[in-house]
Image: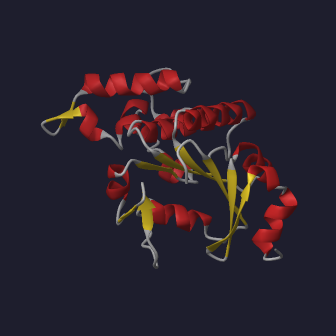
Amino acid sequence: MRRGEILGLAGLVGAGRTELAETLFGLTPADGGEILLHGRAVRIDSPPDAIELRIGYLPEDRRQHGVVLEMAVAANTSLASLGAVSHHGLIDAGEERRLARRFVEQLRVKTPSLYAETGSLSGGNQQKVALARWLAIEPEMLILDEPTQGVDIGSKSEIHQMMGDLAEKGLAIVMISSELPEILGMSDRIAVMREGTIAGILPRGEATQESILALALGHA
């Protein structure tokens, strides 16, 4: 990964894309190898380790793992950065409100209130709240697993625009997507996975649906 890059992660179902993401975020132990950050080896044994290293992870199943549906928008937004809104172990409601308002405005989340249940929002706005949670940690690297799955066309376009804006500001983004047009349209480089390994990496100018599928199927 490079600063300011969107790296698309493509492959067939079962190729290991989500498992790789979970390993980078400390949810799944690595079988071997090492993870380098700024050129030095780091250990990521748990999500708190990843958060400490300013790595965020937006999982594929938004309703199951991306947001807590019964919690308010404000509480969901601060969930990964409680230290920033707490004093002496207690959450400062004012700080949490300011944090949430900042990202609700930045991401244009459509919600009647910062204290509305997140589950009452549309799918696209739930996804924005999930994204706000990770932007609140001021990440250097953000892993997005199927970030536009199950959202409407308008929200999809907004999420793509946000990704481009974040990359321009220097954020490194890994985007997992099963939609080849999305992979081709959004990625600076594309890593294709097959059977748990990266079968090849294609620069934007050389990537086509045919070349991606050839790597994914083992024909290249």
46 vs 44, nearest the viewer: 44
Residue 189 position, x and y percent, is 68, 53
Q: Residue at x 61, y 75 (%)?
A: 196
Residue 200 position, x and y percent, is 70, 68
Residue sticking out furthest to the right? 210
11 vs 82, nearest the viewer: 11
Q: Residue at x 75, y 50 (%)?
A: 204
Q: Quadrant of residue 68?
A: top left
Residue 170 position, x and y percent, is 52, 38
Image quarter (top left, top right, bottom left or bottom right) of the N terminus = bottom right
Q: Quadrant of residue 19?
A: bottom right
Above or below, comparing residue 14 to residue 179 in the picture: below
Residue 75 showing in the rendered view: yes
Residue 122 showing in the rendered view: no
- In this rendering, would 220 be left or right of 82? right
Residue sticking out furthest to the front? 39
Above or below, comparing residue 102 to residue 160 in the picture: above
- In this rendering, would 147 be left or right of 96? right
Image quarter (top left, top right, bottom left or bottom right) of the C terminus = bottom right
Q: Residue at x 53, y 53 (%)?
A: 59
Q: Residue at x 28, y 40 (%)?
A: 82
